[in-house]
Image (cartoon, helix red, strand yellow):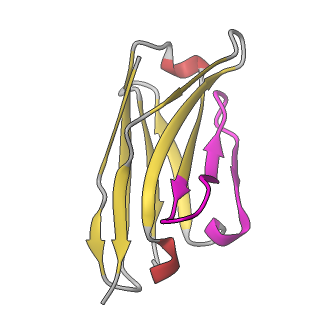
């Protein structure tokens, strides 16, 4: 199983980034996909999740600013991040969760830095 996250970088406050996570080795359409982040010195936390059927949920800090989506034809999940703030800085990871098997897989993460 491979989850390849990309799209991170350095952006100024108020800017936008679009993260992508390409999956292989899983039946992508059957997996719930999630984006998590880990700031320096902090625990990894959920950002947003999208189920295999396309239902989405967001944690409070992501509501109204971030949008999670998926393209099952491309085995890819996206995270569109707008109005970025310095506190959004961290490593962003994607996760695949197969409810039928209990499998849970992580990508390598992509660094997001929001700074002027």
Q: Could you say where residue 8 lies in the image, as x and y percent from the top left?
A: 31, 58
Left or right, residue 13 beside residue 26: left
> Number of labelled discs?
0
Q: Could you say where residue 70 lies in the image, as x and y percent from the top left?
A: 49, 38
Q: Which residue: 44% across, 64% down?
A: 90
| Residue range (magenta) | 37-62
* Quadrant (top left/top right/bottom left/bottom right) for the N terminus: top left
Residue placed most toward the observer, 78 or 8: 8
Residue 18 visible in image: yes
Q: Could you say where residue 20 lies in the image, as x and y percent from the top left?
A: 36, 45
Left or right, residue 83 beside residue 114: right
Is 74 rendered above or below residue 68? above
Magenta segment: does it hold 57? yes
Is 37 rendered above or below residue 82? above
**Residue 66 sits in quarter:** bottom right
Q: Could you say where residue 61 lies in the image, as x and y percent from the top left?
A: 66, 71
Is 13 rendered above or below residue 64? below
Magenta segment: does it hold 2? no
Q: Which residue: 42% across, 56% down?
A: 91
Query: Which residue is most to the bottom?
Result: 116
**Residue 54 sits in quarter:** top right
Query: Which residue is most to the front?
Result: 41
Q: Which residue: 67% across, 29% down?
A: 53
Residue placed most toward the observer, 39 or 116: 39
**Residue 95 sits in quarter:** top right
* Quadrant (top left/top right/bottom left/bottom right) for the C terminus: bottom left
Residue 85 visible in image: no
């Amino acid at each position: 199983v491979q989850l390849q996250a990309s799209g991170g970088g350095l952006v100024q406050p108020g800017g936008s980034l679009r993260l992508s996570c390409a999956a292989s080795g899983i039946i992508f359409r059957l997996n719930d996909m999630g984006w998590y982040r880990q700031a320096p010195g902090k625990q990894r936390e959920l950002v947003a999740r999208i189920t295999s059927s396309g239902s989405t949920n967001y944690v409070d800090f992501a509501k109204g600013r971030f949008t999670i989506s998926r393209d099952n034809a491309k085995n890819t999940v996206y995270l569109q991040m707008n109005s970025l703030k310095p506190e959004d800085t961290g490593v962003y990871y994607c996760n695949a969760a197969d409810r039928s098997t209990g499998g849970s897989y992580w990508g390598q993460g992509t660094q997001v830095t929001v700074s002027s």
